[in-house]
Amino acid sequence: MTGFFRLDRALVCDHVPLADIAASVGTPCYIYSAPLIRERYARLERALAAMPFRLHYALKANSTLAVVRLLRDLGAAADVNSVGELEVALRAGFTPEQIVVTGVGKTRTEIARAVSLGVAAINAESFGEIDRIAAAARAAGRPARIAVRINPDVDAGTHRHISTGSQATKFGVSLQDARAMIHEAARDPALRIVGLHVHVGSQITRSVEPLVRAATIVAELARELMAEGVPLEHIDLGGGLGIPYRKDEPVLSPEEYAEALAPVVRDTTPLILFEPGRWLVGPCGVLVTEVVDVKDRPGGGTFVIVDAGMTDLIRPALYEAWHEIEPVVLDTVPAPARPVDVVGPVCETTDTFATARPLAPVDVGDLLAIRDAGAYGSVMASNYNRRPLAPEVLVDGPGEWRIIRRRQTIDDMLQLES
């Protein structure tokens, strides 16, 4: 068994008690399972084996250097959304040829860096961006490899804040504009069209239909362009495969995902790119936090106040996202659960992890684990209220763990200020 499970009353990560790690590094802290990341990566590879595929790990899910290195060692390529993520990918050991650069608002500095490196592809988002990429390529004296991001006007059926495939969002260009961009770019010797890109949203769990519709649109355009003599090297189908944040929540499996997409892209380009992030690392991390107060409120209800806050894990505040919460160590004699609000210490009412959530009685000093926090957790953390960033720990086998990011200090936080 890999990942997080119970031995007797204690929640462990690959046989390491979470309470032992918390006692050593303090709380709040993030804890990740390297064996579970490896297991999930291998499963996704097996599922996609019917296609000529390459996995580009989406660093936006979790860009902690040790996690990125682990995915590189497993054979992943990289998908980056900023010059910061690009530099992390390079420091993690990826070569430029393994990196796809995406993002809706690339600066001239970011474009120039990507062009100078010779990355695998820059996913272009507009006519103006095509012009800026071409100018950077001429300045660098080397052609830029680009893919055009299509906005297929497909509703992903997910939370409105993480849906990217409809025309109401800022991402990509219409099918009509994409054709014009590609034909215009094909005439520019500073540009080399290598692919098409589409990504309709994140955390798609209920139906593969939005992904199939988007892939169909892009696949048909790829066939059309290649028949016209445009030598495309790949279709990039993005990411989006979701995970079950609630216990027993039915979600699409990677096997269902691959089985639905394989016929759509068959006989298109030599390579199909995927950009998994959340599916690979989300279930592989927890946020461990300590109860600092238990407070009844007038009119009924109880606040369980913990030392982690929206500065550590913003998803519930930002997306009204659900994360399972459970005691790290169960009482010897279990007591009936009762509904409580689990809240953080940040000076915002939205600093709430759960409302009216059934939870066994807890006392000050008890530890709670917030599950499925391996993606969009530490990577979205902030210093609001001058709260230091939490440490991160990687467990890599029974009894083996190490700190991969130490707890930030006030001196760290202030070193750029005068």
Image (tube, rainbow, N blue to C red):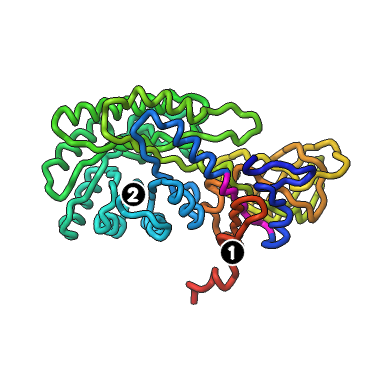
Identify whether 9 is placed above or below 229: below
Give the amino acid at mark 2. Answer: Gln
Tag shown at residue 161: none
Label 1 packing within 10 angstroms: few (<14), some (14-19), many (20+): some
Asked whether residue 32 is drawn in magenta, I would say yes
| Percent position of residue 378, x then y | 55, 53
Q: Considering the image in quadrants, where does the N terminus appear?
A: top right
Relative side of 13 to 278, left or right: right
Q: Nearer the viewer, residue 124 or 215?
A: 215
Relative side of 161 to 98, left or right: right
For the residue labelled by badge 2, is the local secondary structure a helix, a strand or a loop? helix
Residue 346 in view = no
Going 75% across and 45% down the picture, which residue do you hit?
A: 327
Relative side of 190 to 272, left or right: left
Quadrant of residue 107 within the rendered picture:
bottom left
Magenta-tinted stretch = 27-35
Tag shown at residue 98: 2
Q: Nearer the viewer, residue 372 or 39?
A: 39
Of circles 2 and 1, the one toward us is 2
Going 84% across and 36% down the picture, which residue do you hit?
A: 336
Give the amino acid at mark 1. Answer: Arg
- First in sequence: mark 2 or mark 1? 2
| Percent position of residue 283, x then y | 58, 41
Going 16% across and 35% down the picture, which residue do you hit?
A: 230
- Say which residue label 1 marks: 406
Total labels drawn: 2
The answer for how far apart the CA atoms under marks 2 and 1 are is 29 Å
Relative side of 330 to 369, left or right: right
